[in-house]
Amino acid sequence: MRVKFLSILTAALVPLAWPAAAEGKLTVYTYESFTADWGPGPQVEKAFEAECACDLQFVSVADGVALLNRVKLEGGATRADIVLGLDTNLTAEAKATGLFAPHGAGLAPLAVPGGWNDDVFVPYDYGYFAVVYDSDKVANPPKSLEELVEGDPREKIVIQDPRTSTPGLGLLLWVKSVYGDKAGEAWAKLKPRVLTVTPGWSEAYGLLTNGEAPMVLSYTTSPAYHMIAENSERYKAAAFEEGHYLQIEVAGATVNGAKNPLSQRFLAFMTGPAFQDVIPETNWMLPAGKTDKPLDPAFGKLVQPGKSLLFSAEEVAKNRKAWIDEWLAAISK
């Protein structure tokens, strides 16, 4: 899929000329779907270790918000050199911990909506949240967030918890961006349609593909997996009239990790083709850096959001607790 870029800033890490061999270990904290057998992790690990002659070790948690929570809990004693899997909704809060170091690298071409000029975090992919539905079970999918909220409660949706999951937080912000002060009322109306709330994306999407739910919160790019890997167009993303909420996923070095020369090397590697070529058909997101090969034509068949929705990282950091409390109050009644 080719989304409509809001703007393109020439910005990404310039790969440096590294020595042919390196020694040592790099510990990368990330989320479970990244390290799964079908995720990017195995291919990324193989490619980076071949280049650096080092030991890349992934440590995974359920989802992106849980990732930040773990690093905050560990504090200065964290074993993470790199934290990969936060997004722009969490970067201001992550910086405020004082646990992350500036990447200090030069910049080269990135293609991220809105451009990129963050001095701490580096983007590696992006996408738009969407309601993905089983077309064998849902004849008339919602055409807007309003139709989802007001729709038939017998057609259930699985969502993720915004306290642990970046997609869950994304939906929270999506609802807030559309409904504003009436977001609590919208959640109360949506509640009868919610089959369950999962800690992370993997559990939620599995309920869709296992036939236990007809709809799930996921991404506009998710149907590409089914088209490419399964030769099926059964699972589709619903295009919403109000627009779709943008997610840009990022990685950054911890203060401890910045002392490890492999950290900067990994961040540079992450923006290059050896990493970026892996992203579209394993993480099922859009690459943030240059690739050596074009996207599969299936990506061109996907929903292209007419409008991109996004709060600033600072606004999310300021309001996240209050907005989650609003969600909890409505969803737990």
Image (spheres, rainbow, N blue to C red):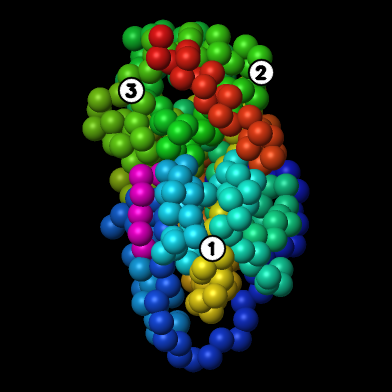
Dot 3 corresponds to which residue? 196
At a point 36% along the width and 45% down the height, the residue shown is 62
The mark that comes first in sequence, 2 or 3, is: 2
Q: Nearer the viewer, mark 2 or mark 1?
A: 1
| In the rendered image, the vertical position of residue 38 relative to residue 177, given as above or below | below
Give the numbered dot on residue 24: none
How much space separates mark 2 and mark 3, taking CA atoms? 24 Å
Q: Position of residue 2 (x, y in %)?
A: 60, 47
The mark that comes first in sequence, 2 or 1, is: 2
Q: Position of residue 38 (x, y in %)?
A: 31, 55
The three-letter code of the residue at mark 1 reads Thr
Q: Is residue 209 left or right of residue 316?
A: left
Q: Dot 1 lies on which element?
A: loop
How much space separates mark 1 and mark 3, taking CA atoms? 34 Å
At a point 63% along the width and 49% down the height, the residue shown is 96
Q: Position of residue 259 (x, y in %)?
A: 54, 75
Give the numbered dot on residue 254: 1
How much space separates mark 2 and mark 1, taking CA atoms? 35 Å
Dot 2 corresponds to which residue? 180
Would you call the spot at circle 3 few (<14 residues within 10 Å), some (14-19), or many (20 or more)?
some
User: Which region shows up in magenta?
Assistant: 58-64
At a point 44% along the width and 60% down the height, the residue shown is 78
The three-letter code of the residue at mark 3 reads Thr
Does the segment drawn in magenta span residue 4? Answer: no
Does the segment drawn in magenta span residue 60? Answer: yes
